[in-house]
Amino acid sequence: MESLRMGAVGEEGSGKSTLIGVLASGTLDDARGLARMKVLRHNHEVESGRTSSISATLLGFDGDGQVVNHRKSLLARKPLQAEIVRDSDRVLTVFDCAGHEKYLKTTVFGISANDPDYILLVIDANRGIQKMTREHLGVALALQLPLVVVITKCDVADGQAAAPDGSNPRLARTWAQVQRILRSPAAGNRKCLLVRSYDDVAGACRALRNDLAEAAAAAADDAAETRAGPGAVPCFHVSNVTGAGLGFLRAFLAQCPHTRAYKGFDRAEAGLEVRLEDVFHVEGEGTVFSGSVRAGAIEVNDKLLLGPLDGWVRVCVQSIHVNGVPSRRALCGQALTLTLSAVPAKASERGSGAGPPRPKLNHSFDPNSRRGLKLLRARKGLVLLDARRQADMPSGVREFDAEVVLLHHPNGIVSGYEPVIHAESVQQSARLVEIIPVETYEKRKRALSGGSADEDVALLKAPRVRSGGDEPPRDVHGVPTFSTPGLPTNAAPRADEAPAIRNTHVISDSEDDGTTWEARDSDGAECSVDEVEEEEAREGGADESEDEEEAILPGGKAICRFRFKFRPEFVVPGTKILFREGTTRGVGQIISVKNI
């Protein structure tokens, strides 16, 4: 049985909860919020109509592509997950994410922690693409997740008269806006596939399979240029009140390819890694964990390590449920809930005898105690790992290096910047310790590996820009020489070719003899270094280039070293990260970690 996950994102009021409720129940909305009542979790969400948490809805499809949830025997009451899974050949879990800016961190955590196969971007046909729609789209592009666009409320024109041909002018304007944004270079020059028939559904699925296969081949080839997700974007125009376009959307959900089958690496045979996303208490069962298997497989009675929790806790798996159905085993890519029990410590583990280094074990923590439940609910980023892997025992990470791109920021960022880091289920504030240009980082890496040339090592030790007090090159007569591009040495530039620069003293490294000097006054005439230094001293003194602080401006790319502020986390190289300060500021990927 196939198991897929999809996250529904978009601006507040775009109809995400209503769309999920209509797909799950099979009944149309009454334009007053009837369908969304089947999805909302809390009373305040029902009263305000605003989603503030992440809710999961299960959709089952049989072999013929029909929705199992819609069967008459199940419509009299809300179907149980076990009943849906029993008769389904494909199970799709749809996560309803919050659309209001106030709950952006909840939405970002839901997308990064749940690792969905697709992102369902829901857009209101009347309002078009709003601020939070762009924010959610940027997160999906940063995480390289396949996109599916659904434009809702196509039957409403806000009282505006329809065009002579019966079309909706607001819908046409929104559709043009969607195409313009998705086809832009910032979005990866994607191709919008408008689905208007069942043949278009088959064509969209075929295009996605081709794109996923190309992405998998590019991931296997390190030299190939990779795209930020598939280039084809299926688009649907639907109405939750009239039902227009919903049949095509259901058919696509029943046929869309499983993205995990096209990964460029095989994690099924890797060591076990279970990312925990939520913790809750069930009377009679104790503490229940929900998460997903990112690598390997997990079975009942497995002895695992839970952490980081001031060290690692040895636990035993008591029970496993996959999609609400009891199971003895969960495979890579499946979502699950499980119960754990603490394993008593052995006498040899409590001692400090000789032997290979082991991770710090926390023998006093009990996940089923009241204190343990309170701590677990406050912690994000917990993982379950195989305790039998003695060769690479896990440890927490305090510092890590990441290659980041700053998307937007009012002034740029410098060392000391403290954003919130999202890395899969990890969510914690971190301090920017150091900014390293990409070229400098590569040369440092070659120097540490021992394969760099002597000049590379010397360049690492030398400053990037030399100060104004260095001695300029001189000719055979001892006179300082100045070079201007396009002119002979010591020739004054023409006024119509060079702009008037006030006492500039530019020094840059060159590949020949090391230095190029320029010194001109505002009239374009040459001036001596002493005159330049005297002018700088009158203006407040020359700045030492070694004291200049490295900064990243919007659109810039660099290697950043981050340090978690409060506690170690479990992250590995290759993990995609987002960092935000209110809104998303930048994205990146972890390239190295420093274990404690």
Image (cartoon, rainbow, N blue to C red):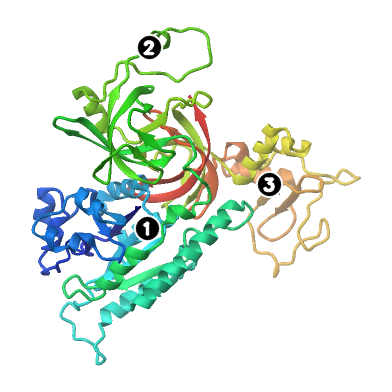
- Residue at the (24%, 34%) spot, across then down: 288
Can you give x and y, in whole percent of width and height, for residue 581 in the image? 36, 46
Does label 1 or label 2 sit earlier along the sequence?
Answer: 1
- In space, the residues marked 3 and 2 are separated at their CA atoms by 74 Å
Residue farthest bottom in this picture: 164
Q: Amino acid at mark 3?
A: Val
Would you place residue 112 above or below residue 170 in this image?
Answer: above
Circle 2 residue: 346
Camera-nearest label, 3 or 2: 2
Under tag 1, what secondary structure? strand
Residue farthest right in this picture: 476
Between 85 and 204, the one lying in front of the other is 85
Tag count in the figure?
3
Would you place residue 122 above or below residue 420 in this image?
Answer: below
Q: How many residues crowd mark 1 within 10 Å: few (<14), some (14–19), many (20+)?
A: many
Does label 3 or label 1 sit earlier along the sequence?
Answer: 1
Q: Are marks 3 and 2 in contact (CB under 8 Å)?
A: no
- In space, the residues marked 1 and 2 are separated at their CA atoms by 45 Å
